[in-house]
Image (cartoon, helix red, strand yellow):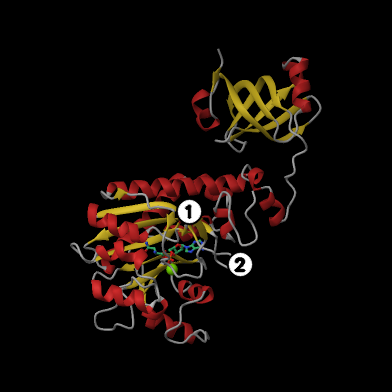
């Protein structure tokens, strides 16, 4: 019996005959020899089919193979330092599972819209494959990081009765005789969970009907949202820098091949260790004005502003103390300067902008009630949230990290759409 193996583990099988099940990535031929680049989802290998060494049927089958045909091959594994994977397969047997029709994605250049229309196939390409593996490792690192620190994973609902991050980006849906909204954030539910478990996080999809087309926005994205009882915003920022550094180091250790495929300059990622610089919003405005921005105190930072600030540093930078006016209703105001909040954004370097938003929450019932009114939010859907301030309210903080923004930065992508397996964009809900 020939053992069926995955290419990822091929190094353990040098000298043996193995079976690989996969797809034809590419093919070259020189008359009496066919070179098949075979992928099985985990890795690629070059299979060599020599006419004089296989049956005529096998050689014919190799000849007929088209790009992305599915196949089962058997062959002897040899070390081949000159090849991409370091190994080669001397093919002994080959079976076509399905002969693929003319594949629409060829090694030539295609436009982005063309590729997005074929996202279900595009995922097979080297670059997209590498990005998804980095994404997978970031999720693994996230779970490991929070597990090691005794956080409890609590899942937040997707269908919710109220807005949290502003009413202009809500996706509305019918909920029997009522209205519901797709969740913009799990935060409020994490605040409830933090009062039950101390330190919690959720990780799930969140939705924003962002009506602007930018390279930093998706309609559906995944967010990691930790929430901690008895944490100040300083404690919160410390946890963020530990978490972000942990993820970057994890990817550097586990994804060197993927980062190479992506041609990522890893020297820039190696700098990502604590402590991260911290500047106040006041300082940020000064820096921006010096750089010719016409931003005035009180206005939110735009994407361009974030890039200017971030480019002053070689690692992510915290901007804290934003104006209360531009932030959501739940942010705790600074005790001596109520016009600013105890919250921060973390801006990634190299022009990637905000990857985290977070802060300390209002713990006081009256102030929170007042804020809901100021933001013209209906009281009823938030009654349960106000309860948390009635029964054992404590200072608490938390944050939300956007997974696609983080993938995009760590992989060095030009646009967020490649960081999501099936991106939902302003003009696209297909495939
Ligand atoms: O700053 P945001 O809006 O914060 C919140 O939602 C808080 N409730 C989180 C919390 O404290 N638990 O969003 C957090 C992060 C942003 O920093 C960004 O990385 C990402 O979510 N994000 C988006 N990513 C892709 N597309 C969008 N449209 C995004 N909107 C926010
Ligand atoms: Mg934000």
Q: Which residue is drawn at 24% across and 80% down?
A: 335
Left or right, 282 with reference to 10? left
Left or right, 430 with reference to 307? right
Ligand 2 position by quadrant: bottom left
Q: Is residue 23 visible?
A: yes
Sequence-wise, the earlier of marks 1 and 2 is: 1
Question: Considering the image in quadrants, where does the N terminus appear?
Answer: top right
Pick out the residue farthest to the top. 1
Residue 395 x %, y %: 22, 67
Q: Name the residue under label 1.
A: 176
Q: Can residue 323 be seen in this view?
A: no
Pick out the residue farthest to the left. 392
Seen from the viewer's position, the closer of residues 72 and 43 is 72
Q: Residue 213 carries which label?
A: 2
Pick out the residue farthest to the right. 31
Q: Residue 364 carries which label?
A: none
In the image, residue 45 above or below residue 158: above
Q: Which residue is drawn at 64% across and 23% down?
A: 72
Closer to us: mark 1 or mark 2?
1
């Amino acid at each position: 019996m020939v053992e069926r193996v995955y290419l990822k583990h091929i190094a353990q099988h040098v000298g043996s005959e193995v079976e690989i099940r996969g797809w034809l990535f590419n093919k070259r031929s020189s008359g009496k020899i066919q070179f098949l680049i075979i992928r099985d989802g985990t890795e690629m290998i070059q299979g060599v089919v020599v006419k004089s060494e296989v049956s005529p049927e096998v050689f014919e089958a190799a000849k007929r193979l088209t790009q992305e045909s599915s196949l089962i091959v058997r062959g002897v594994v040899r070390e081949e330092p000159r090849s991409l994977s370091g190994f080669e397969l001397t093919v002994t047997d080959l079976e076509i599972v399905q002969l693929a029709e003319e594949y629409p994605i060829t090694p030539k250049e295609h436009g982005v819209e063309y590729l997005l229309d074929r996202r279900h196939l595009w995922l097979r390409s080297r670059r997209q494959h590498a990005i998804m593996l980095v994404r997978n490792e970031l999720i693994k690192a996230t779970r490991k990081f929070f597990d090691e620190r005794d956080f409890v994973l609590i899942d937040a609902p997707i269908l919710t009765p109220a807005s949290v991050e502003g009413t202009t980006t809500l996706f509305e849906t019918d909920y029997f005789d009522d209205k519901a909204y797709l969740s913009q954030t799990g935060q409020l539910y994490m605040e409830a969970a933090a009062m039950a478990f101390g330190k919690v996080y959720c990780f799930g999809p969140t939705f924003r009907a962002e009506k602007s087309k930018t390279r930093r926005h998706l309609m559906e994205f995944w967010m990691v949202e930790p929430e901690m009882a008895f944490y100040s915003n300083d404690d919160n920022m410390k946890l963020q820098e530990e978490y972000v550094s942990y993820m970057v180091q994890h990817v550097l250790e586990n994804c060197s091949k993927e980062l190479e495929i992506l041609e990522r300059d890893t020297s820039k990622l190696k700098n990502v260790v604590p402590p991260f610089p911290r500047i106040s919003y006041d300082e940020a405005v000064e820096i921006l004005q010096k750089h010719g921005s016409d931003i005035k105190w009180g206005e939110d930072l735009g994407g361009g502003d974030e890039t200017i600030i971030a480019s002053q540093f070689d690692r992510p930078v915290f901007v804290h103390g934003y104006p209360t006016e531009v932030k959501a209703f739940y942010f705790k105001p600074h005790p001596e300067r109520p016009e600013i909040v105890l919250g921060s954004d973390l801006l990634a370097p190299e022009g990637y902008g905000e990857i985290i938003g977070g802060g300390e929450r209002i713990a006081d019932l009256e102030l929170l009630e007042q804020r809901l009114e100021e933001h013209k939010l209906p009281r009823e859907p938030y009654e349960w949230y106000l309860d948390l301030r009635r029964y054992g309210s404590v200072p608490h903080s938390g944050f939300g990290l956007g997974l696609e923004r983080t993938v995009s930065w760590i992989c060095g992508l030009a646009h967020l759409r490649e960081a999501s397996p099936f991106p939902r964009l302003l003009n696209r809900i297909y495939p």
